[in-house]
Image: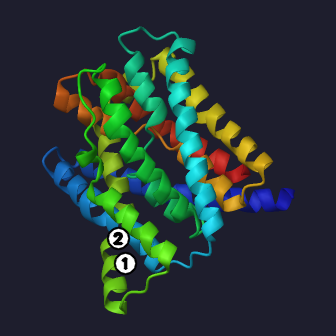
Amino acid sequence: MLKETVVGSFVVLKQMSVIAILVGIGIWLQKRNVLNEKATPVISRIVVDICNPALIVSAILTGDITVTHEEFLTGVGVSAAVYFLLIVLAYLIPVITRVSKDDRKFYTLMTIYGNVGFLGIPVARAILPENAMLYVIICNVFYNLLFYTQGVIALSSGKEKMNLKKAFSPGVLMSILALVVFWFDLKFPQIIVSTVDYIGSPTVFLSMILLGAVVGRSRLFQAVKDLHMWIFILIRYVAVPIIAVLVLDHMGAPEVMVRTFCLMCSVPAGNLPMIQAEKTGERTDVLSRGIILTTVFSFISITVLMSFV
């Protein structure tokens, strides 16, 4: 058992080290003014609207997915339960951490909406078996549908209305397509499979250097001083993933499912709430600090947690 744990830890550490190197390249490119504020939005759009959706579909078309329909439906149920519990925790954690009432809605959003797409997909592809991608896709569908309903309303304190049209982004549409392909075991010509695979291949590299550019521009040392944020991080990004693992393991869930949802609960705060906040004129200081700290912290937490799951 100890030998298996050590071997598993080494594999995760190796993969996370590769990701850390890619992020380091992004920081270097940002300092060299290659990934400047004009370049990153363009590359981000390519990743979010083209490469990431292609990676999602490619995982189903080219991967050897052996998940049964029963396990798939269990994954849907587990994902729904996880997000339900995160919504409950989202209104408890800000009270526990004693943040000001003006900041609570931002902590609420960071609790629910982790970076399951932009970071979760490439990291899952790097450190988890192929079957894991199916559960990652399910999480991404829930994420988007929830954000443009509950998330938009919570951020605006009830002033904004839900917008389901925006929820059906290219990523969500491709996620739904991938699930349909899996469910009906659809087959496509090799030329289409290869094309989708090539388009999705740059996702890990591009998304990680973009993450490096964000870290390179951030004021990390100022963010580190936020005590409330650190208490929040320990609860949300350490305690919650551990509890998720214990509950799923007790339920007898497959190992791949347990590891996938551990990762989905461990990914850092997503940037979609901050983008929405900028669009609607809300403050972004709390969200930006949260994204920076949880992203840096996640390299340690994901490596440690995934090594022992």
Locate residue 187 relative to residue 279 in the image: left or right.
Answer: right
Measuring 29% from the left and 33% from the top, which residue is drawn there?
A: 274
Give the Cα separation between the discs numbered 1 and 2: 5 Å
The amino acid at mark 2 is Gly
Q: Residue 228, which numbered label? A: none
Q: Residue at x 45, y 40 (%)?
A: 114
Q: SS class of the residue under badge 1?
A: helix
Q: Is the residue under label 2 in contact with that under label 1 (CB below 8 Å)?
A: yes
| Farthest-out residue, bottom | 190
10 Å crowding of disc 2: few (<14), some (14-19), many (20+): many
Percent position of residue 126, x then y = 52, 64
Tell me, yes or no, if residue 115 can be seen here. yes
Q: Residue at x 18, y 49 (%)?
A: 41
Q: Secondary structure at mark 2?
A: helix
Image coordinates of residue 263 in percent, x first then y, are 57, 49
Residue where numbered disc 1 is placed: 197
Q: Is residue 305 above or below residue 277?
A: below
Asked whether 18 or 57 is in front, the reply is 57
Q: Residues within 10 Å of mark 1 (few under 14, many from 20)?
A: many
Q: Is residue 112 left or right of residue 106?
A: right
Q: Which residue is mark 2?
A: 200
Camera-side residue of 146 and 272:
146
Residue, far left: 38
> Could you tell me the amino acid type at mark 1?
Asp
- Colour scheme in use: rainbow
Q: Name the spot of residue 226 as percent of width and height, x first.
A: 45, 17
